[in-house]
Image (cartoon, helix red, strand yellow):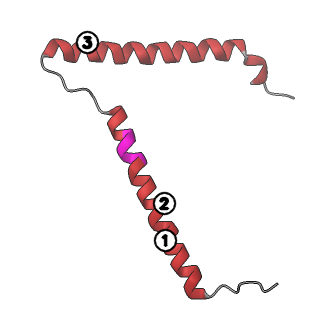
Amino acid sequence: MIKHVYTLAEIKARHKELAERVARSEASIRDQWNELTAPPVVDNPVQLWVNRAQAAYSIYDGLMSGYKLFRHYRGFFKRKK
């Protein structure tokens, strides 16, 4: 059984190929994230205020849920002496 000997040129070519692949993947993830977190297009000022109120409530709800979970599982977070 003969083992393949990798040359420096093959390693550099593979490294360049993988770096390009990672860059494409990062760009794709960045585009998807921007699309998901972009504010919706509003037609009138009332809709803008409604969207802001929904966002504020979502933040409040997330914080309260986290606080309640933290209180429930606080035994895991205590310092041990």
Q: Main secondary structure of the magenta part?
A: helix
Q: Which residue is mark 1?
A: 17
The residue under the point 30% across, 33% down is 38
Q: Is residue 71 left or right of residue 11?
A: right
Q: Position of residue 77 (x, y in %)?
A: 74, 24
Residue 24, placed above or below residue 14:
above
Mark 1 belongs to which amino acid? Glu
The residue under the point 34% across, 40% down is 34
Give the label on residue 50, or none.
3
User: How busy is the neighbourhood of tag 2: few (under 14 within 10 Å), some, or many (20 plus)?
Assistant: few
Q: Which residue is mark 2?
A: 22
Determine the CA span between mark 2 and mark 1: 9 Å
- Quadrant location, the N terminus: bottom right
Q: Is residue 45 magenta?
A: no
Stretch in magenta: 29-33
The residue under the point 79% across, 27% down is 79
